[in-house]
Image (cartoon, rainbow, N blue to C red):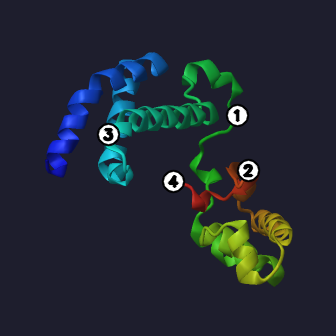
Amino acid sequence: MNLADQFEAIVSEHYEPLFRFAMSLTRTECDAQDLTQHTFLVWATKGHQLRDLRKVKTWLYTTLHRAFLRMRRKQWSFPHLDLEEVIDQLPASSPVLSDRVDALQVLPALTKVDETYRAAVTLYYLEDYTYGDIALILGVPVGTVKSRVARGIAQLRELLLSDGLPAAPSLNVETRNGALVPVPCWNQAA
């Protein structure tokens, strides 16, 4: 029996019971179908590694269960919320276009930031390096990089305010490496 026939036989034999197992875990048909399809995708790419084909059933159920646990962890970390339910929890901010700082306004101000901080800020925001990567590039500890980025952004904010520009780099934050960090508007999709 060739590999395609073997795959088809395994799918035919195990699809329905695997789908029922997925339904018992997810309680939604759509998620159960996704999990079942994902399980067979993993089987198609990694099934050849299984030496004893008598253990296919166990392998499939284990793979599906692990995929389900990953899905639940992701849903727990990033829950889906309806906007109407959380509208009162959102920060009050005006979407006025003048609150956005253009890169053409920020880059000249960045050249005025103290050289000690400029490299870290540039690598972090313009080149999208992680704190760890910047630490390796600059040859300093990660804590020093975090400090330089924060101080550089503070200096940049002051420079922008002194030029009469909005200090947008301090208005938005995101989570990077488990910490809330400021996000300049030139690093965001408009």
Point out residue 122 in the picture as x, y percentages from the top left corner: 68, 74
Alpha carbon distance from label 4 to label 2: 22 Å
Query: What residue is drawn where x is 55% and y is 33%?
Result: 69
Q: Secondary structure at mark 1?
A: loop
Numbered disc in front, either 3 or 1? 3
Q: Residue 141 or 156: which is nearer the viewer?
A: 141
How packed mark 3 is, by other alpha carbons closer than 10 Å (few <14, some 14-19, many 20 or more), is many
What's the residue type where badge 4 is placed?
Ala
Alpha carbon distance from label 4 to label 1: 19 Å
Point out residue 17 in the picture as x, y percentages from the top left corner: 33, 21
Identify the residue under disc 2. Answer: 178
Identify the residue under disc 3. Answer: 40
From where the camera sits, is residue 166 visible?
no
Identify the residue under disc 1. Answer: 92
What's the residue type where badge 3 is placed?
Phe
Is mark 4 in CB contact (under 8 Å) with mark 2? Answer: no
Is mark 1 in CB contact (under 8 Å) with mark 2? Answer: no
Q: Secondary structure at mark 2?
A: loop
Could you tell whether 166 is left or right of 39 in the image?
right
* 78 lies above or below 154: above
* 16 lies above or below 66: above
How packed mark 1 is, by other alpha carbons closer than 10 Å (few <14, some 14-19, many 20 or more), is few
What's the residue type where badge 2 is placed?
Gly
Label 3 or label 1, whichever comes before in sequence order: 3
Identify the residue under disc 4. Answer: 189
Query: What residue is drawn where x is 51% and y is 36%?
Result: 66
Numbered disc in front, either 3 or 4? 3
Alpha carbon distance from label 3 to label 4: 36 Å
Label 4 or label 1, whichever comes before in sequence order: 1
How packed mark 4 is, by other alpha carbons closer than 10 Å (few <14, some 14-19, many 20 or more), is few
